[in-house]
Amino acid sequence: LQRAHAAFPWIVTWDDHEVENNYADEISEEDSEPDQDPEVFLRRRAAAYQAYYEHMPLRRRSVPRGPDARLYRRLTYGNLAEFNVLDTRQYRANQPCGDAFPANCPGRLDPDQTITGERQERWLRRGLAASNTRWNVLAQQIFMAQIDLVGGPKEGFYVDGWDGYVASRDRLLNFLYRRRVSNPVVLTGDWHANWLCDLKTNFDDPDSPVVGTEFVGTSITSTDYAAAQPAYGSVVLEENPHIRYFNNQRGYVRCRLTQEEWRTDYRVVPYVKRPGAAIHTTASFVIEEGNPTAHQIAGAKPFGGARAASRAAGSTPMPPDQP
């Protein structure tokens, strides 16, 4: 990680663990800690935001003001790409369904359930509508595509992600489709695994148009949750045909952009608990300009990783992003 920071400029954004697991705006995660008191939590958030600013490459506009900090921003690279860096933590409504995992409840569909807040959502729409770049990138924190985590007829979703804020997601994806935003690509973290997803206006309709691709990148060294339940990747792929690739190894995602295509390479290592692991590309995908669907051009099958997976209907993963 230190060598990566030394080798490349970084565009950073936070998620939850800079402050507390699964916090939402000014709401602390339900637990037995003193920050159940909102005043205590906001002091904790202020200290965390200040520490983040002091240790990360950020411009002065992101200087914290107490428990608040403006982190969402836009970076434009000529006419090639524009990066919309989102903050899906500081302005969101509380997670529905009691933040259970996995979960399904009417609160997921509440039209007032926002993950970005109204101001940031308006900012994002205006920027996407005005963009003149070939690629329009959303760099953000948590799984955007729908992900049913339960095998069989029942459904269960990750409600800390966009599945807990369906109205926000529907507004965004339908906006991308209606306005014909040029080549939208979403870059996501959080899950400690590699995924590739088609982003659709209706995930339950196989004929619904694909409006963009989501690349979910693994962690560099942090825990591999598939180690505890290695079957869940194949279950998720079976339940979600719009999720087309999964790999549970450590590594990073490399993206190369030209005016003609976007290429993504999933770079992984076989182990991280001792030095000397050789990095290699386990799969590569290309998005051609004007076609939102990614096509695999090299590498492993859609389910890949350090461990063989067996199909096991009904198995569900551990929640992502746990300490």
Image (cartoon, grey):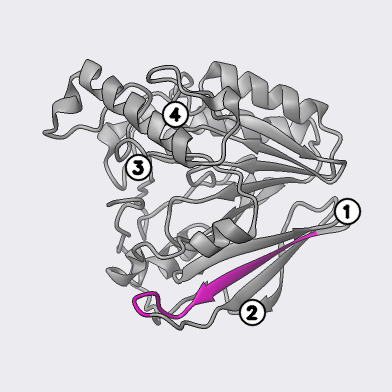
Range of magenta residues = 262-274
* Residue 91 in view of the camera: yes
- 270 in the magenta segment: yes
When asked about the image quadrant of residue 192, the answer is bottom left
Local crowd size for mark 2, using a 10 Å CA cut-off: few (<14), some (14–19), many (≥20): some
Task: Where is residue 228? Give x, y as percent.
Answer: 27, 69
How far apart, in angstroms, are the residues tagged by discs 2 and 1?
24 Å
Q: Relative to the observer, which residue lies in front, 55 or 28?
A: 55
Contact, mark 1 vs mark 4 (Cβ under 8 Å): no
Q: Taking 92 as reference, is 260 above or below it?
A: below
Identified at 44% across, 17% down, the residue is 65
- Left or right, 315 with respect to 178, comes to left
Mark 2 / mark 3, whichever is N-terminal: 3
How far apart, in angstroms, are the residues tagged by discs 1 and 4?
38 Å
Under mark 2, the amino acid is Gly
Marks 2, 3: nearer the viewer: 3
Which residue position is annotated with label 4?
109
Identified at 79% across, 36% down, the residue is 181
Which residue position is annotated with label 2?
299
